[in-house]
Image (spheres, rainbow, N blue to C red):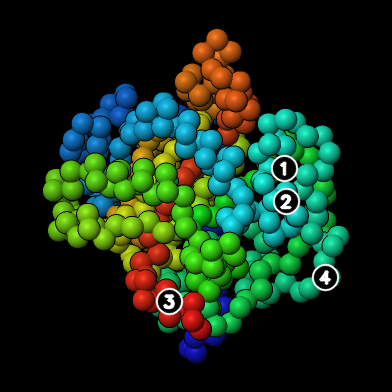
Amino acid sequence: MPLSKQRFARPPTPPDTDTTLRRSERFYKRKDIPLDLSDAFDWQRDDSGATKIGEKCYTFPRHPGLIYLPGYLNHDEQRDLIKLSLRDIPTPPNRTSLDAHYNLPNDGLWAHYASGTKTAVATPRADSEAPRATPSYYAPSGERPMINNAPSTFETLKEIARSRNPEIPPSPTVKPLDGEKALYKLRWTNIGHYYHWGLKHYDFSVRDPLTNGAIAIPKQVAQVCKEAVEAVPWQHTSVADAAAEWKRSYRPDAGIINYYNLNDTLMAHVDRSEVTATLPLVSISLGHAAVFLIGDDMRESSTPPTPIILRSGDVVIMSGPTRRSYHGVPRILERSLPPHLAYDDERDDDDWEPFARYLASARINVNVRQSGLTDEQIAELVSL
Ligand SMILES: O=C(O)CCC(=O)C(=O)O
Ligand SMILES: [Fe+2]
């Protein structure tokens, strides 16, 4: 198939059959019966379902390359990353889920949320732009289209960099949002290299307009992820050989911050947009706890996925073969916000209050990847 066809080809979504993965997702999503977490791995209750390879470090025999570091971040580190994720990161040049449809204040939404701005802070782009057609590569719903995406290759990325593909046109039906509503509507912010949500590939030709260089991931985020990768006793894992090289070559340069309200879920998927299929992906949980489900590399696998309870401060690393495993978040756990993230007027500075207010109904996930291209390859893409 010629590349241009291949790029836009969307393999048919398998029917929503009764796979073990779907069954498990449905089980954790159900809100009409009390939630049963007895099958989920919870290191605080019983850690016998995993292999302990260090103090607070687990691996799972069925998921080679999956590393779980519960309680990796201390309370202050969690608060710092939360502040960064809500106040600093959702501002240009980082793109948010709202940008396609709304004009947002240049300094971001946070100040408006914190002060409770009642006037419109996010206004519909469709009101100020000429209408245009939806490119064919967009899923009809315009929602996060990440199922069945083709693995990224340097050749595909070259074509994408050459062709300047338009993003989704602004929706003509969205309404203006005040400070509070706008922040609760925020689903994700991309960090690092520009991610084209329609094509489900990075577009390296998009640069930081301020520096004309690559859009960098925030230093603090890169540092936390590097330290987490270094903290793993890889020699005790089944990916020890490959990991010896990661110690040198791990350099995160892309990612997404996911913001979940209590009813939000993330359907099982594989992240295939990074050219390397094995380098560590570091995923940090903040705020409310969640059920994380991870299976193997087949959507229709008959092996049941592993449910893991992820709490604020936990880190999951997906590396090696597990980097191409189906995973998702079928449930945010109600009433699971830890006390150290709530606002206490005797303990906390006033500036923590709006963060605690937001977290009262939210989970944040900082999901950091490495695109897998060398500086030379990126330079070539930029020059196209
Ligand atoms: O929220 C999570 O824990 C996982 C998010 C995820 O899988 C993704 O962003 O690709
Ligand atoms: Fe993912």
Q: Are marks 1 and 3 in contact (CB under 8 Å)?
A: no
* Quadrant of the rendered image containing residue 76: top left
Report how far apart the C-alphas of labels 2 and 1 lie in the structure. 9 Å
Q: CA distance from mark 3 to mark 4?
A: 34 Å
Which sits earlier in the primary sequence, circle 4 or circle 2? 2
Neighbour class for label 4 at 10 Å: few (<14), some, many (≥20)?
few
Disc 3 vs disc 4: which is toward the camera?
3
Residue 30 pos. (x, y %): 56, 36
Residue 216 in sight in this render: yes
User: SS for tag 4?
Assistant: loop
Q: How much space separates mark 1 and mark 3, taking CA atoms?
A: 36 Å
Question: Considering the numbered disc 3 on the image, is that residue within a helix, a strand or a loop?
Answer: helix
Residue corresponding to mark 1: 182
Q: Is residue 14 visible?
A: no
Give the left or right position of residue 249, taking residue 365 as reference: left
**Does the closest atom of ligand 1 sit within 8 Å of the Cβ of label 4?**
no
x 36%, y 43%: residue: 224
* Left or right, residue 25 beside residue 261: left
Residue most extreme to the front = 211
Q: Amino acid at mark 4?
A: Pro
Kind of residue at badge 3: Ala
Q: Is residue 335 above or below residue 283?
A: above
- Disc 4 designates what residue? 131
Look at the picture and state if 123 lies above or below 137.
above
Residue nearer the viewer, 67 or 113: 113
Vertical order, 44 against 243 (above or below): above
Q: Which residue is mark 3?
A: 379
> Measured from the top left, where is residue 13 in percent x and y?
54, 66
Mark nearer the N terminus (1 vs 3) = 1
